[in-house]
Image: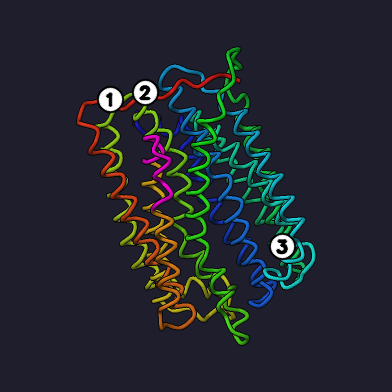
Amino acid sequence: MDRVRSIADGGRVILTLGLVADGVGSYLYLTSSGRALGPERFALISVMWAVLFLIGNGLFIPVEQELARSIASSHAQGDDGNGIVSRLATAAGVLVAVVAVVGIALSGTIRASLFRDQTGFVAALIVGVASIACMFLVRGVLAGTGRYAAYGALFMADAAAKAAPALGAAAAGVDEPLVYAWIMATSGFIGCLVALAVARPIGLRRGTGPATPWPPILSALGFLLLTSVLSLTVINIGTVAVEVLSGPTEEAAAGIFLSALVIARVPLFLFQAVQAVVLPRLSAKASVGDIHGFRADLRLLAGGLAGLTAVAVVGAFALGAFAQRVLFGDEFDRIDGRDMGLLTLASMLMTGALTLNQAQIALRRQHQTWWPWALALVAFVAVAATSTSDLLGRVEWAMCAAGAVALVVAAWLLRSELRRVPPGEALSPEPRVGTI
C-alpha cells in the first residue's frame, strides 16, 4: 500500500491515464477523419500526420530529453537545475523560426509533392511544428521535476482538443481535409495551457550565477537532434514510402497503411510514459554512481518489453485486421493478420531501441545514440529496394529489418559502455549546471 500511495502521489496514475487518453484521442481523431474523408482524401491527413510527427518530434524530442536529464541529474546532486531551461527555450524558438522560413520558401514544392497542390496545408504544418515545440519544452520541465500529474494532464487536453472537434466535424458531414489538418496542428497549444495550469508553480528557483554555457548544450542537442531525426525517419518512413512507391491505381494505399499502423503503434504511445519516468530515474542514478540500480532498472525494462512484444504481436496477428475494420470501416478492409503482425513487431523492436537510447542518454553518451538509427535506415532502404513482396509487404518487412538492426546495435553499444564501469564504481559526476 505504501508503494501504491507513492506512485499515486507522484502523479504516475494520472500520467498513465493521460497516455491512455492520448491514444484514445488519436484513434478517435484518425477514425472520424478517415470515415468522413474516405481513403483517398484521408491520405492527405495520413501524410501530414507522418510529416508533422517526423519534423516536429524529430526536432524537439531532444529538447525534452536534455531538459529531463539535466534537471533530474542536477536535483540528484543538490543543484536547482534551472539553468538549462532558458537556453533550451531559446534553441527551440530558433528551430521553429528556421522551419517557418524554410516552409514558406519551399511552400510550392512541399504542396505539390506531399499535399497534391492543396492550399493551406503548409501553413497548418508550420503551426503544428510550433505547437509541438511548446509541448516538448513543457514536457521536459515537467518530467525533470517529477510533475507527472501535469504531464498526464497535457496528454489528456491534447487528446480532447484533437478528438472532440474531429468527431463534431465528422458528425456534421465536413469532408474538407484542411479542416482536420488544422485540428491536428493546434491541439498541442491547448495541452500546454492545461499542463501549465495544473503544474503551477513549476518550482524552479531563479539563480544569480552565470548562465549555462552554450557549447555542452549545443553538443548534446546536436547528437540528440541527429538521433531524433534518424529514429523518427525510420519510424515514420513507412507511410511516406507507401505514398511514394504506390502506382496510379494505389492512391488510397497510404491512408490504408496508416490506418493499420496507428493500431500497431499502441506500444509507441506507451513509450512516452517510459521516457517521462525512466529517463529522469536513470539519469539520477547515473549521476550519483548507483550502477547496480541502473542495471537492475534496465533488466526490468528488458523483461517487460520482451513479454509485451510477444503478447502484442500475437494479438495483432489474431485481431488486428478485425480492429481496423471496426475502427475505420469496410473501405479500409485491405489489411490481413500478417500485415498487422509485422507492423506490430516492427513497432515493438523500435520501442526497444528507443528505450535503450534513454539509457545511453542517462549515461551522457549522446554521441552514441544516432548510430543504431543510421544503420536501421540503411537496412530499411536495402530491404524495401530488394524485396519482391507486394507494396505493403515490402514496406512492412523493411520496417521489421530496420527495427531489428536498431535494437541490436543499441544493445551492443550500451552493453559495451556498461562493461567499462566496474560494479560499485561511481560514474563520472555530472558537470554542474549554471543558473538562469
Of tags 3 and 2, the one toward the viewer is 2
Q: CA distance from mark 3 to mark 2?
A: 48 Å
Task: First in sequence, mark 3 or 2: give its number.
Answer: 3
Residue 173, can we see it? no
Which amino acid lies under the numbered mark 3 shown in the image of this protein? Tyr
| Magenta extent | 359-371
The colour scheme applied to this rendered structure is rainbow
**Which quadrant holds residue 73?**
top left
Q: Is residue 149 above or below residue 176?
A: above
Give the image location of residue 371, x and y in percent. Answer: 40, 51
Q: Horizontally, is 323 left or right of 30 in the view?
A: left
User: x and y percent of residue 14 in the render?
Assistant: 51, 40
Spatial separation of the CA atoms under disc 3 and disc 1: 51 Å
Q: Earlier in the sequence, mark 3 or mark 1?
A: 3
Q: Amino acid at mark 1?
A: Ala
Label 2 sits on what residue type? Pro
- The residue carrying mark 2 is 429
Q: Is residue 354 left or right of residue 165?
A: left
Q: Quadrant of the N terminus?
A: top left
Q: Which mark is residue 426?
A: 1
- Label 3: few (<14), some (14–19) or many (≥20) C-alpha neighbours in 10 Å: many
Labelled pair 2, 1 in contact (Cβ < 8 Å): yes
For the residue carrying disc 1, how many other residues have a C-alpha within 10 Å: few (<14), some (14-19), or many (20+)? some
Which image quarter: residue 267? bottom left
Residue 406 belongs to the span the image colors magenta: no
Q: CA distance from mark 2 to mark 1?
A: 8 Å
Residue extending furthest toward the bottom: 249
Magenta stretch: dominant SS?
Answer: helix
